[in-house]
Image (spheres, rainbow, N blue to C red):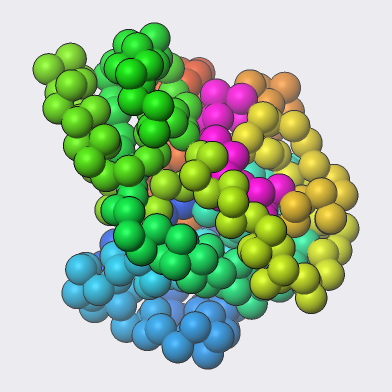
Amino acid sequence: MSSSESRSESARILLFPGQGTEAVGMSAGWEAHGAWRRTVEAAEAHTGSPLKRLMAEGPLEELRRQRHAPFAVLAHSVGIFRARREAGMPLPVAATGHSMGFYSALVAAGVVPLEAALALISAVEDLSAAAFADTPMGMAFVIGVAEAEVRQALSDRADLVLSNRNGRAQFTVSGPLPSLEGLVETLRPSAMKVGLLPVRHPLHGPHMAALLPALARRLTAVEPAVPAFPLISHFDGRLIVDGRAAWDEGLASVALPVDWLAVVARLKTLSAPLAECGHGTQLSGLTRWAERGLVVDSLQLPPQPS
């Protein structure tokens, strides 16, 4: 896309993907764009992680490490946004993100600087590692099973919680690893796909709630600004236009379930084109599963110089 083409495009709603979209080669073509490069270099300086090398060359196992993957996804998505803006893309009508993708939306909207979002990720990792050191935790995904059946399977597993409603038949569950393994085996015969996710924390559930006070204390120096465009809560789909409320949502999101169906309901009311601002088609797929009539374009290919 040339700069002139970019400047003539309609304002869109941007969807920022979360962890799990990292892939070797995700940075291809973006290294030539100064805004992307500066964003990733700033993330590298703050975290000490070799993000450009991992995104370009791997190995995948190292890129997917608990400390590397979220940094890479955040820096890449924000870098794409900034490079697109530099090429003339208008400010979005609104934006949201799935799970930690909401952090990318916070940075893109100017609510907090990149370094604050990276510090939030580090704090979640630090506090979770300490809190669950003696109790293996994680998340499982379930695809192709009705919500009622998933909830029935959870009814005698009080230590597990439905953490993501990604679609009418796509869910994640959080909690202790042994119970998750049992749930996976219970649902395997009726599921299209079911398994464990490569995370070691029970995100988006009440297990994380006890960490919120310490998380807030770690980030007390952050002063959020008014967002440059509305943000959509991935918890209940409401529009957030206040900076403090947006940052509070980001802090609390580790303990709040993700309801992509509520997000999709909001997207339908805004009636604007949709675009995924990151690598892959994670949110294109989820959104189409929830509402077949919604088409999500991708911004993952770099714009071409005019």
- How many numbered marks, from 0 up? 0
Closer-to-camera residue (28/194):
194
Q: Quadrant where the C terminus lies?
A: bottom right
Q: Position of residue 212 (x, y in %)?
A: 64, 55
Q: Quadrant of residue 70?
A: bottom left
* Up/down of 24 relative to 99, above or below: below
Q: Position of residue 273 (x, y in %)?
A: 62, 35
| Residue furthest out toward the front | 134
From the viewer's perspective, tell me whether residue 54 is left or right of residue 14: left
Residue 69 is at least partly visible in this image? no
Q: Position of residue 86 (x, y in %)?
A: 66, 71
Q: Position of residue 248 (x, y in %)?
A: 75, 52
* Up/down of 78 relative to 207, above or below: below
- Verify whether residue 192 appears in magenta: no
Residue displayed at 60% across by 67% down = 120
Residue displayed at 85% across by 45% down = 241
Q: Which residues are magenta?
A: 249-263
Q: Quadrant of residue 103?
A: bottom right
- Verify whether residue 256 appears in magenta: yes
* Up/down of 169 relative to 254, above or below: above
Residue displayed at 33% across by 18% down = 156
Residue displayed at 75% across by 32% down = 238
From the viewer's perspective, tell me whether residue 95 is left or right of residue 167: right
Residue 112 is at least partly visible in this image? yes
